[in-house]
Image: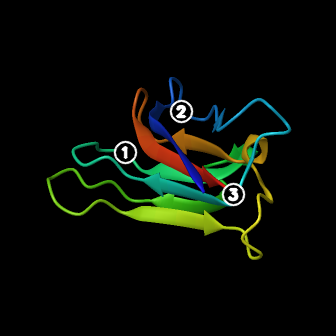
């Protein structure tokens, strides 16, 4: 498998989800999201059309870790281990402007 570490993906404007990719052909077999220690707002993982206030299109809410310590993480894994996860169908949003999540993905 090949790892691609996107690093910290920031959300400039809360309520405007940022897709992991704009390429509809970009696929992965596993995607990892991790909160960044020291940030203050919640992170949202979902579809590019998610609405965080109503939680529609939201897959997971990642709580912040404003101190140091273990950061919450969430992983999506293709059931068959193949590159079945469309990166353009996943997005992040944040409660606080300019904050983000660490995102990495693996391709078979």
Seen from the viewer's position, the closer of residues 44 and 36 is: 36
Binning the other alpha carbons within 10 Å of mark 2 as few (below 14), some (14 to 19) or many (20 upward) gives some
Mark drawn on residue 108: 3
Q: Is residue 31 left or right of residue 37?
A: right
In the rendered view, tell whether residue 51 sits above or below residue 13.
below
What separation in Å lies between label 3 and label 2 (alpha carbons)? 33 Å
Residue at 70% across / 34% down in the picture?
Answer: 21
Q: Which residue is mark 1?
A: 41
Mark drawn on residue 56: none
The reply to whether the C-beta atoms of the residues labelled 3 and 2 are less than 8 Å apart is no
In terms of sequence position, does the residue under pointer 1 or pointer 2 come before the other? 2
Residue at 33% across / 54% down in the picture?
Answer: 64
For mark 2, give the secondary structure.
Answer: loop
Residue at 15% across / 52% down in the picture?
Answer: 67
Binning the other alpha carbons within 10 Å of mark 3 as few (below 14), some (14 to 19) or many (20 upward) gives few
Residue 55, percent from left and from top: 65, 57
């Amino acid at each position: 498998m090949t790892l691609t570490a996107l690093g910290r993906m920031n959300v400039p404007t809360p309520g405007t989800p940022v897709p992991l990719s704009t390429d509809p052909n970009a696929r992965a077999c596993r995607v990892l999201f991790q909160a960044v220690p020291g940030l203050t707002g919640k992170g949202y993982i979902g579809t590019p059309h998610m609405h965080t206030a109503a939680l529609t299109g939201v897959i997971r809410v990642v709580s912040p870790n404003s101190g140091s310590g273990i950061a919450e993480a969430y992983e999506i894994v293709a059931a068959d281990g193949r590159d079945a996860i469309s990166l353009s169908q996943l997005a992040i949003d944040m409660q606080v402007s300019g904050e983000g999540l660490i995102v990495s993905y693996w391709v078979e």
